[in-house]
Image: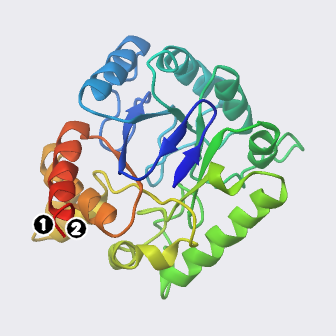
Amino acid sequence: MHWQTSRFAIDLSTPQVMGIVNVTPDSFSDGGQHASHHAALLHCERLLKDGAHLLDIGGESTRPGAPPVPQDEELARVLPVIRHAVTLGVPVSVDTYKPAVMQAALDLGADIVNDIWALRWTDGQGGPTGASVVAAHPNCGVCLMHMHRDPQTMQVAPMEGDVVPQVLSFLELLAQHLRALGVDSNRICLDPGIGFGKTVAQNFALLARQAQAVPAGYPVLAGWSRKSSLAAVTQTSLSNAASMDVDQRRAPSITAAVLAVQNGAHVVRVHDVRDTVSALKVLAAMQAQV
């Protein structure tokens, strides 16, 4: 299986590690660490040295309750970083739901649009949609993610019932819509949206039944890194989970990434690239003997 993107046909026969570059002051686990352009550029290079296969650059936090970032501010944050990242020889993804940011990133040579809104967001003023931006591009890749409600309300009233068929039907519908606009299926990757409007139990149901949650034939991107569900199941109380720092979430994050790949994920989006790459090599060595 390959994922076609602007400049690369990414070979998914081995799991791909997508390194996270948050050019934000307020992301839930690394806000402010790479907020300056210089720090973000150094972080891109560090992630590649650690073994990242792709870079995912975002300028707006999507943690629960995070306020929206004005479009001009998001553009100012991410475009200088993308301009440099596309010279580094790996696929570059822009993590955004705003069509204007997608277009500007693609114009600079970005390879992938990674959208938590699955191209559904509009400005309410009749402007271009994310779907129209992606469909107009000859071959960019796109990742469509399932999200319940929006970042401001998704954890206030999370989903109810068995989430697996709900996520499956959502992703099927959105992928079909994009195909109807002329986007080849090999350009589309799907993300079940861990933590975006789901309870802890629902997130782990999506991990256990990952193959059932994503339509057959599409690659799967899994984003478990440093999510609160990992803290919830590894701490003895909710208060301990809430205060669990980044270092304490590293081992659970790596474990979840390995389990996601073992259950069929093709791409894992992570903060801790070096350790995740090492862990996946262990998994590959075992699988080679089966």
Say which quadrant the C terminus sits in: bottom left
Q: Which residue is mark 2?
A: 232
Q: Is residue 200 visible?
A: yes
Looking at this view, is 286 or 104 the one in front? 286
> In the picture, residue 139 is in which quadrant?
top right
Discs 2, 1 touching: Cβ within 8 Å: yes
Horizontally, is 169 left or right of 58 in the view?
right
Question: What amino acid is labelled 1 in the image?
Answer: Gln
> In the picture, residue 20 is in which quadrant?
top left
Q: Which residue is mark 1?
A: 235
- 88 up-or-down from 181: above or below: above
Which element carries disc 1, helix, strand or loop?
loop
Q: Is residue 252 visible?
A: no
Q: Position of residue 45 (x, y in %)?
A: 33, 19
Which element carries disc 2, helix, strand or loop?
helix
- 156 up-or-down from 17: above or below: below
Q: Position of residue 177 (x, y in %)?
A: 78, 62
- 262 up-or-down from 280: above or below: below
Among all residues in the image, which is located at the extreme front?
A: 289
Query: What's the CA distance linking mark 2 and mark 1?
Result: 6 Å
Among all residues in the image, which is located at the extreme left?
A: 236
Q: Position of residue 275 (x, y in %)?
A: 17, 42
